[in-house]
Image (tube, rainbow, N blue to C red):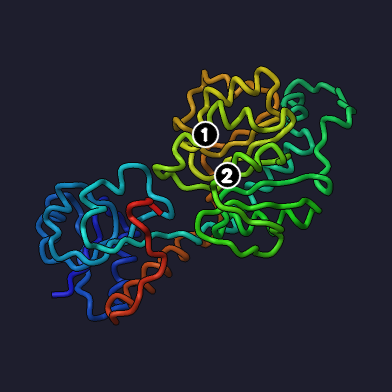
Amino acid sequence: MNRFVMLPPSDQLTETWASAVAEAAPSLDVEVATDRETALRLLPEAVAAYGSLDPELLSQSGNLRWLQAPMAAPPAGFFFPELVAHPVEVTNFRGVYNDHVATHAVAMLLGLARNLPVYMRQQPTGTWDRHLADADILHLPESTVLVIGVGGIGTEIGRMVAAFGARVIGIDPRRSDCPEGITEIHPPAQLDRLLPQADVVVLTLPHTPESEGMFGAERLALMKPSALLVNIGRGATVQLGPLTEALQQGRLGGAALDVFEEEPLPSTHPLWREPKTILTPHVAVVGPYIPERRLAVLCENARRFAAGEALTNLVDKSLWY
């Protein structure tokens, strides 16, 4: 039996997607597990599944050969040791958010570069203070932007920022080619050497064992006191305590964050009140066509799986991406 299980939780969208998968791959017997009990009953005969597993569910999945993760970069805990050791292939939804997340990151960068956080904080009180110091502005045509993580999102950020005249350098563990807009690309081992050169550091990294806590006190100290930090990857890559201290002590020019170590960020956290920050509540992925794009990836992989073809968006389970 070629059973494909849509894992819980389920809703009306799940039912719609199940029908679409069945149409894309007629040889698959698509079943919706509306609850955990049903999932445990269906998984022993499943060869493929969509959703998240835990050790108990995986223990009932001896025939599973493909798992489609329900997000582009699954959170910590998704790739637990038993799943990493299991022969199942895992795919994700990377690529579906590239334009939305890149645009959000560049909007934040431009906001910091033009000192907009200061003016935004004046608006509620109607304060007319022009802040005419040139030092408050980052002139992008004379700047260096370091993009850490040159996947689909990082590539799009590089292309967009280069259009403003910035010199864009990339860091990535997997690629050595320079996509449009990026003038140099280096392996992660060069990060500490390149950080002091950067006027802007943009993080697009997934949460992995290597990226967790990557930007703490030591790395922040390598950055220029005027440098700007933008994080639209995963919150666990930036330690908020050292970041807050660096901003409070004037050792960093500004920060724009869409993701945080702790989400929701507590209303009492001092970052909310830092004058040179832009904080958004994990919304960079918001934009039109995302459900359609995700479904297209799922259906294409279902078709490929049924036809015995190589899957797209394969994940290295040991690296979590």
Marks 1/2: CA distance? 9 Å
Q: In this view, does 196 lie above or below 67?
A: above
Q: Is mark 2 on a helix, strand or loop?
A: strand
| Residue 318 placement (x, y as % from top left) | 33, 52
Q: Given the image, on which type of amino acid does mark 1 rest?
A: Val
At 22% across and 70% down in the image, what residue appears? 30
At 65% across and 23% down in the image, what residue appears? 247
| Residue 292 placement (x, y as % from top left) | 46, 65
Callout 2: 10 Å neighbours few (<14), some, many (20+)? many
Looking at this view, is 144 or 163 the one in front? Answer: 144
| Residue 266 placement (x, y as % from top left) | 48, 23
At 29% across and 55% down in the image, what residue appears? 51
User: In screen coordinates, is 199 left or right of 13?
Assistant: right
Q: Are marks 1 and 2 in contact (CB under 8 Å)?
A: yes
User: In screen coordinates, is 321 left or right of 271?
Assistant: left
Count up the numbered dots: 2
Quarter holding the N terminus is bottom left
At 24% across and 47% down in the image, what residue appears? 81
- The residue where tag 1 is placed is 238
